[in-house]
Image: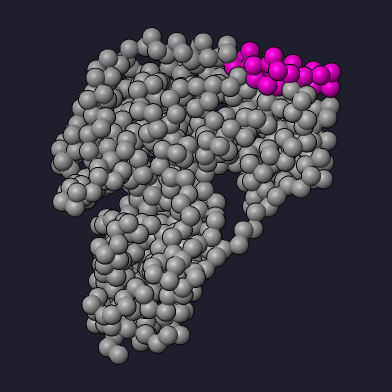
């Protein structure tokens, strides 16, 4: 059988199986050696747009972060396709982020056939295990052939890739019928997901491909060959907390004042958040809620949103606020003070996570290997619901045994309320301070929309000024490695699952990923194609407003030990770049507004909300004096 036909059938079986096991999106970085992968994926997306969406991004680094955003927002594995050589290396930063944040990515790299390896062939290097131990699995694929055994292997390789990548694709099994492909149980995506918690990771499959590279897409059975009717099924491996273990954990609370850290990854859905809140109410546990925890949208008194302002230098706290046991869900919070308090060594540390402690402070005393939702459900089952006082508006347990814990919770609530008054005063600031604009974003962003925060000062400002009980938002951020790399691309990827997304970023982060604005054309092409099809599906024309807090440099260093009046400080750390972002926006066809006061910002933001594609609002704030501007809200 000709190579073009064999390659088409082999890759057709592979991509068909990927979609049966939950992959719904593929991002293609154009190149020559990856031609068969790209064309077969394109053909599947063309024939069955309900099964697969295809995006094209010419910047491999940005493409990988775009796919990261797709997977982060949906919880499902997203696929990536690139050519050989340095293209593979350009995916590396996003692969590292996916590993650390447990985001399911399926990386598909084209490669030269074995006969060209090690002989100086152009665009050829050793791509075996190119990402080392940073992927959950690696598979070197064989040269495509079309016998039944080879096609069955192609499907098996796709299944194994999705299983290894994890995410929502294997949450409830896969169904199939004799008349068509299996359809994965639909996970919670888009506005229904209130945080970017994932339980997957990246996998890498390397495809050696020989000429002729153009596949025969007209071959019969392109996507149906050796498909198994009846379909595969993934059996769960949930790590549950049985009643005896739950009782032993609850016993650790006795006689101790218990505090909980709810970091990134605590709650992925509203239902999970409700159960965590029910547990907190049952046990009178204050929840220090990171902005990425999914809990700040709730107004419960036990949701402590201003803890960074309550805590003093080094994580110090008033005596009545010092915990004797800390339960941590997910990562450590954004707040350095909270992390310092946990690392002080004075409290029993209980970490709840299905895989690892993620404890860079090595402070863990008890590791409970399960999901936060399993933990709280098991502990709630221990409590007799009849013991909850009906007159308590929070439903917190009463009784002599819980009086000390109740007093501890009340002290945190009072301290949090006092900090709220200080933070809310930022609403009276009209210009010159980032916090005032962050507050306006949180207050004006449409209900159910995505708010994507960059790292550095953006996420810290959000931590301070995103007060609980406001509009329900899906708050995301690349906190895995805390980097600025690929932030815009990731946000644009996540935006494909929302009608409205707001990216909150600083100037260096935007500059680092400025090429992502070139996706304005890709988004326009997709809108036009959807309009031509009469496709009114959600996500056909997403709106992305980038709010740029431009202090013309690395203002965060003004708050770090490097701060100095010596000349080296500006040159090496503040690094002003003097970029004309208005000109950059025009170059990419991105609508641009400048707003240096809160009223003009409100006007510009309201105007651009709902505008299809990418738009940019620039807010210019001072580079120096950042520490002094934040001082009233952090002490």
Residue under the point 41% across and 38% down: 191
Observer-nearest residue: 448 or 464? 448
Report whether residue 341 is seen.
Answer: no
Q: Position of residue 103 (x, y in %)?
A: 48, 52
Asked whether residue 396 is drawn in magenta, I would say yes
* Vertical arrangement, residue 141 with respect to residue 200, above or below: below
Q: Is residue 596 left or right of residue 75?
A: left
Q: Is residue 176 left or right of residue 66?
A: right
Observer-nearest residue: 77 or 107? 77
* Vertical arrangement, residue 133 with respect to residue 583, above or below: below
The magenta-colored residue range is 389-416
Report whether residue 224 is seen.
Answer: yes
Q: Is residue 532 left or right of residue 386?
A: left
Residue under the point 26% across and 57% down: 56
Observer-nearest residue: 284 or 93? 284
Residue under the point 37% across and 64% down: 88
> Which quadrant of the figure has residue 352?
top right
> Which quadrant of the figure has residue 396?
top right
Q: Quadrant of the N terminus?
A: bottom left
């Amino acid at each position: 059988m000709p190579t073009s036909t064999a390659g088409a059938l082999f890759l057709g079986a592979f991509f068909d199986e990927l979609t049966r096991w939950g992959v719904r999106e593929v991002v293609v970085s154009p190149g020559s050696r990856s031609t068969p992968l790209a064309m077969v994926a394109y053909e599947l997306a063309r024939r069955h747009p309900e099964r697969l969406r295809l995006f094209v991004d010419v910047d491999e680094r940005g493409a990988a972060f775009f796919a990261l955003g797709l997977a982060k927002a949906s919880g499902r594995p997203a696929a990536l396709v690139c050519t050989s050589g340095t293209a593979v290396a350009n995916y590396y930063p996003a692969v590292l982020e996916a590993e650390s944040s447990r985001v399911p990515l399926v990386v598909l790299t084209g490669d030269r056939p074995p006969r060209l390896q090690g002989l100086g062939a152009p665009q050829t290097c050793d791509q075996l295990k190119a990402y080392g131990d940073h992927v959950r699995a690696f598979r070197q694929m064989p040269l495509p052939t079309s016998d039944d055994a080879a096609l069955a292997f192609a499907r098996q390789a796709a299944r194994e890739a999705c299983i290894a990548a994890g995410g929502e694709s294997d949450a409830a099994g896969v169904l199939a019928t004799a008349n068509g492909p299996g359809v994965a149980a639909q996970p919670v995506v888009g506005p229904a997901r209130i945080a970017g918690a994932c339980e997957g990771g990246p996998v890498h499959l390397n495809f050696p491909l020989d000429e002729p590279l153009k596949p025969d897409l007209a071959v019969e059975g392109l996507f149906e060959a050796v498909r198994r009717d009846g379909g595969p099924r993934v059996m769960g491996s949930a790590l549950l907390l049985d009643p005896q273990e739950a009782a032993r954990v609850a016993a650790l609370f006795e006689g101790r004042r218990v505090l909980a850290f709810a970091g990134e990854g605590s709650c992925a859905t509203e239902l999970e958040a409700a159960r965590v809140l029910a547990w907190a109410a049952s046990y009178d546990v204050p929840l220090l809620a990171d902005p990425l925890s999914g809990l700040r949208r709730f107004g419960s008194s036990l949701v402590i949103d201003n803890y960074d302002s309550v805590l003093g230098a080094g994580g110090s706290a008033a005596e009545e606020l010092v915990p004797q046991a800390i339960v941590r869900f997910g990562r450590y919070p954004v707040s350095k003070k909270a992390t310092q308090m946990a690392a002080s060594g004075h409290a029993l540390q209980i970490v709840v996570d299905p895989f690892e402690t993620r404890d860079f402070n090595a402070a863990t005393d008890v590791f409970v290997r399960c999901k936060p939702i399993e933990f709280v459900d098991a502990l709630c089952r221990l409590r007799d619901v009849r013991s909850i006082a009906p007159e308590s508006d929070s439903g917190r347990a009463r009784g002599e045994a819980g009086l000390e814990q109740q007093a501890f919770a009340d002290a945190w609530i009072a301290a949090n309320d006092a900090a709220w008054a200080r933070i809310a005063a930022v609403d009276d600031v009209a210009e010159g301070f980032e916090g005032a604009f962050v507050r306006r974003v949180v207050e004006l962003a449409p209900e159910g929309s995505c708010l994507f925060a960059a790292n550095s000062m953006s996420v810290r400002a959000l931590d301070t000024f995103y007060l609980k009980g406001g509009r329900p938002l899906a708050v995301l951020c690349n906190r895995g490695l805390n980097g600025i790399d690929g932030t815009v691309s990731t946000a644009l990827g996540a935006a494909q699952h929302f009608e409205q997304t707001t990216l909150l970023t600083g100037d260096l982060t935007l500059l680092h990923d400025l090429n992502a604005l070139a996706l304005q054309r890709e988004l326009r092409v997709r809108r036009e194609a959807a309009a031509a099809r009469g496709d009114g599906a959600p996500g056909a024309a997403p709106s992305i407003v980038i709010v740029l807090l431009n202090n013309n440099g690395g203002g965060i260093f003004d708050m770090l030990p490097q701060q100095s009046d010596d000349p080296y400080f500006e040159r090496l750390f503040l690094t002003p770049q003097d970029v004309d972002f208005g000109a950059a926006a025009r170059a990419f066809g991105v609508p641009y507004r400048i707003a240096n006061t809160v009223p003009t910002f409100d006007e510009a933001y309201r105007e651009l909300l709902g505008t299809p594609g990418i738009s940019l609002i620039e807010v210019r704030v001072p580079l120096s004096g950042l520490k002094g501007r934040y001082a009233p809200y952090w002490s």
